[in-house]
Image (cartoon, helix red, strand yellow):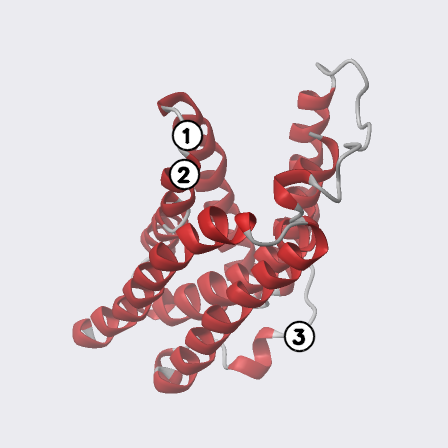
Amino acid sequence: MKSKVNSVWWVYLVLLGLWSFLTPVIHGWLPTVVTGWRFDFLTVMVKAIPWTVLTWWGCRVFRDQLTDQPRQLWHLQLTKVFWISLLVLIGIQSVGQSWQAQPFRLNPNLLTRENGQLLNVTLAAGLFEEWFFRGFLTNSLLKTGPFWRVNLAQAVAFQVIHFPLYLVAGYSSLIWLGNIACVFPLGLLFGWNYQRSHSIWPSMFLHIAWNSMVFLFN
């Protein structure tokens, strides 16, 4: 069992290495060539292809380790935990917005913000990241130990894969800490929702909702 668990983590390390290479391309070189909807489309494609291929391959190779088989992942199961989680995320955003001069005012630069990543940030990140981290990684680790340990491990992995972006963007140490304080708890929350529902729809919806609120209103 231990060797199989280690093999699962190798799939993650392959993705981390690949994403560490692609991130400077997406956020360093690509914006110098295209912007707007073309940039948005290309970033979605660059993310969709490797993440989907590795998730699909991992689910096939480690099929006997999965707690929920691929077809089971897509059944719509919105538990009480999901609705509570959604209210918490909306509440956090509401508190943050209450400090703004115009709370919940749509960002006037939606089509040009971050070089034009509307679909990539609001939709693609939630879809492809949840499919890998909760649909494959957490799914394949649930049988290996207590849930708190599995959830902690996958949340750390979820946080680490954001580090290449922080490095490319040149974030200050304060912004690093702020992002970690946000992303790591979200990883725990998404993992908890998957474990309670055995469906990736709740974590996908929550991920998309959070990213959309941040992108649209901040």
Q: Amino acid at mark 1?
A: Tyr
Q: Residue at x 40, y 66 (%)?
A: 137
Quadrant in which the C terminus appears? top right
Q: Which mark is residue 166?
A: 2
Which comes sooner in the sequence, label 1 or label 3? Answer: 3
- Disc 2 versus disc 1: distance between alpha carbons? 6 Å
- Disc 3 versus disc 2: distance between alpha carbons? 34 Å
Q: Is residue 213 above or below residue 55?
A: above
Residue 208's x, y, as percent? Answer: 66, 51
Closer to us: 38 or 172: 38
Q: Which mark is residue 171?
A: 1
- Disc 1 versus disc 3: distance between alpha carbons? 39 Å
How packed is label 3: few (under 14 Cα within 10 Å), some, or many (20 or more)?
few
Which comes sooner in the sequence, label 2 or label 1? Answer: 2
Secondary element at image label 2: helix
Residue 60's x, y, as percent? Answer: 41, 86
Would residue 2 appear left or right of 189 to someone viewing this image? left
Residue 59's x, y, as percent? Answer: 43, 80
Secondary element at image label 3: loop
Q: Residue at x 30, y 61 (%)?
A: 17
Q: Which residue is mark 3?
A: 75
Residue 131's x, y, as percent? Answer: 53, 67
Q: Amino acid at mark 2?
A: Tyr
Q: Is residue 105 visible?
A: yes
Displayed quadrant of residue 102:
top right
Which comes sooner in the sequence, label 3 or label 2? Answer: 3
Check if mark 2's residue and mark 1's residue have beta carbons within 8 Å.
yes
